[in-house]
Amino acid sequence: MTPPNAILHGGYHHALSRSWQAERTLTKDMLMYPMFITDDPEAFDTIDSLPGQYRIGINKLNDFIAPLVKKGLKSVILFGVPLKEGVKDATGTRADDPEGPTILAIQLLRKNFPDLFVACDVCLCEYTSHGHCGVLREDGTLNNDLSIKRIAEVAVNYAKAGAQCVAPSDMMDGRIRAIKEGLMESGYAHKVMLISYSAKFAGSWYGPFRDAANSAPAFGDRRCYQLPANARRLARRAIKRDMEEGADCIMVKPGMPYLDIVREASEIASDYPISVYQVSGEYAMLYQSAKAGVFDLKSIVLESMTGFIRAGATLILTYYTPDLLTWLDEDR
Ligand code: PBG
Ligand code: ZN
């Protein structure tokens, strides 16, 4: 006979008792929506590789966000996408252009949606002519010192424009300290959260994003600054370093293929919020598979969220946020 303590089914026969098996469950306030803001004020452009997502101009932003806020959207993360001729240069001068899409969007969102938490991705690749995430030396390799100086300046200018959170995705060494010190010197450190993309891995998952953001490198790749896919131990070192340097939250990216790293992060940084970025390639993969009839979109996306939370995430960046706001109101 099966021994009594081997009988597990009784403990999760009912839907309610199944819900009690979770340590935490998904709520709307755990979602942060990544958005692309472009420099044609009237733009509302679809993105072939990211169906359902848009490159939005400043004049279209209010009407796009208003219904989402009504449905319970609590936070966004902004990516500036300059598409006009002649905007890009070797050092990413226009990243913090006061008339550029990112700063205008921060100001508009803060003014029109006072309860929305506005985070800003900080990177140079959307603004550099070579498409790399930092400033380069003559031989095409990174100049880390110049890069973090520039990245810290940009982060401080996003904070001054009203961003409540800055999240550097460039993967330069020492950027967290440089930004935190910049925020301290300018008097913003007490009210701006610093999320570090500490464990950001190089690979193929960012393809649709680079289409959307027009930020693919003109030569080479990002493997000398983003982490190698095999590098669990390097990720641990990066997380520890960024905690030391003053990060307020640790991010793991991509999400689904790196759940082991989410778990690691939640253990190493057990006193920090842990964020995970379900990136563009993950979004597109689930979308296209569901479209091909492989599985039901709502079920598979909700299951992916459960995986993130089970692994230890407390904040999830996902392009599925608008759908999830609807799905979380429905029966599951
Ligand atoms: C830019 C940046 C990237 C992403 C976020 N910030 C692309 C990259 O590093 O090449 C990827 C996001 C996604 O794929 O959804 N540094
Ligand atoms: Zn970049």
Image: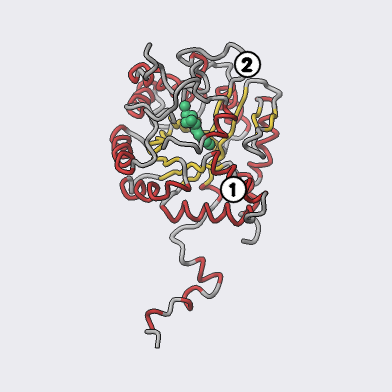
Quadrant location of the C terminus?
bottom right
Mark nearest the camera among 1 and 2 is 1
Rendered image quadrant of residue 50: top right
Rendered image quadrant of residue 241: top left
Q: Is residue 122 visible?
A: no
Residue highlighted by disc 2: 84
Nearer-the-camera pick, 133 or 56: 133
Q: Is residue 274 left or right of residue 211?
A: left
Nearer-the-camera pick, 288 or 326: 288
Query: Which residue: 63% across, 20% down?
Result: 39
Query: Which residue: 46% across, 41% down?
Result: 254
Q: Is residue 95 left or right of residue 331?
A: left
Rendered image quadrant of residue 298: bottom right
Query: Label 1 vs label 2: CA separation?
Result: 32 Å
Are discs 1 and 2 less than 8 Å apart at CB? no
Q: Is residue 86 visible?
A: yes
Q: Secondary structure at mark 2?
A: loop
The percent position of residue 55, horizontal first and vertical second, equals 64, 29
Residue highlighted by disc 1: 286
Query: Which residue: 70% across, 29% down?
Result: 44
Q: Residue furthest front?
A: 220
Quadrant location of the N terminus?
bottom left
Relative to 171, is 326 above or below?
below
Relative to 67, is 301 above or below?
below
Q: Secondary structure at mark 1?
A: helix
* Label 1 CA crowd tier, 10 Å (few <14, some 14–19, many 20+): some
Q: Is residue 283 left or right of residue 91?
A: right
Q: How does the figure colour the protein chain or chains?
A: secondary structure
Nearer-the-camera pick, 281 or 182: 281
